[in-house]
Amino acid sequence: MGFFNFFSKEKKETLNQGLEKTKTSFFDKLSKAIAGKSKVDDDVLDNLEEVLVTSDVGVDTTLNIIKRVQERVARDKYVTTSELNNLLRDEIASLLNDNNTNDTEGFTIPEQTRPYVIMVVGVNGVGKTTTIGKLAYQFKKAGLKVYLGAADTFRAAAVEQLVIWSERVGVPIVKQQMGSDPASVAYDTLSSAIANNADVVLIDTAGRLHNKKGLMDELSKIRRVMQKLIPEAPHDVMLVLDGSTGQNAYEQAKQFSAATEVTSMAITKLDGSAKGGVVIGISDQFKIPVRYIGLGEKMEDLQPFNRREFVNTLFENN
């Protein structure tokens, strides 16, 4: 079952606004990089490398993009600086295409998988609980029955915040006392979801990174306990990253990928900074599909990541 399968005018406008700072910053740097040059030569490529790295695309991905541009320049013999914009757009789109980032334009839940369990991971402060709330809203809007599980029992604020979202969206939540065993909360959530024929379950988890072994053990235990009820659970482990932290987001992706098997990502807070390039780098380096991007405060501002639209918006002439 596909959701939101249509890239509407409203979504396009939200994407435009959300990437405005990234776009302006990137093109300011790019125009300086090619100032006074008519063709793409080694100087321009050196400058371009700096533009991409300072736009939070990441060093490895930048080198990858530069290599692709060099090959294209060698093949086409003469590339003018005015063609560089389109060339970059094509190469970045092609790079994302090679990295498991499909244009899902939403979330597909297999018809036979009910309830579909999404375990949401990420450090505190990245917008994890807000992302869960917005996902719950979008799933409910698509006609699905949603359950929330407050398995971040480490922070009182996390449970309270999730309760507020459950009331706001109008979906049930399963919670226990502060300090309860997170795996027990996850088990209770799945039990209730199964008994009430839920379609989707979203499980919030604690975001403590300073103790990687503790985190690994906790997430492994949640998995094991859920699998007593649903052998394939969780069907998706979604890592939420704060895009506005730039390079920090790479570090978190690295740590969480090592601690548990991450199967998708949501990158939030892209509207407040010029660090949208982080989406390209993270998608390239971790080969884990970016499924959602956060572009603002409103419920609809959490958008399915559409590679083609993202790259086109980034490279559209103002």
Image: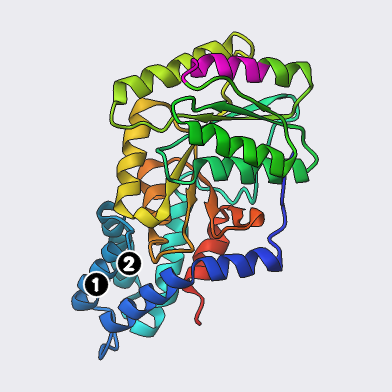
On screen, residue 144 above or below 230: below
Report which residue position mark 2 lands on: 69
Q: Earlier in the sequence, mark 1 or mark 2?
A: 1
Residue 195 in the magenta stretch? The answer is no
**Residue 26: which quarter of the image?**
bottom left
On the image, numbered disc 1 is attached to which residue?
A: 45
How far across and down, in percent of the image, does residue 172 sit? 72, 30
Residue type of the residue flagged with mark 1: Leu
Do residues under tags 1 and 2 come within 8 Å of each other at their CB atoms?
yes
Quarter of the image that includes the N terminus: top right
Q: Which residues fall within the magenta stretch? A: 179-190
Secondary structure at badge 2 equals helix
- Look at the numbered disc 1 and give the secondary structure of its residue: helix
- Taking the image as shown, residue 5 lies to the left or right of residue 228, namely right
Prevailing SS of the magenta stretch: helix
Mark 1: few/some/many CA within 10 Å (<14, 14-19, 20+)? some
Q: Is residue 101 above or below residue 111?
A: below
Decide which of 45, 12 is in the foreground and name it.
12
Is residue 186 within the magenta segment?
A: yes
Q: Residue furthest top?
A: 228
Q: Nearer the viewer, mark 1 or mark 2?
A: 1
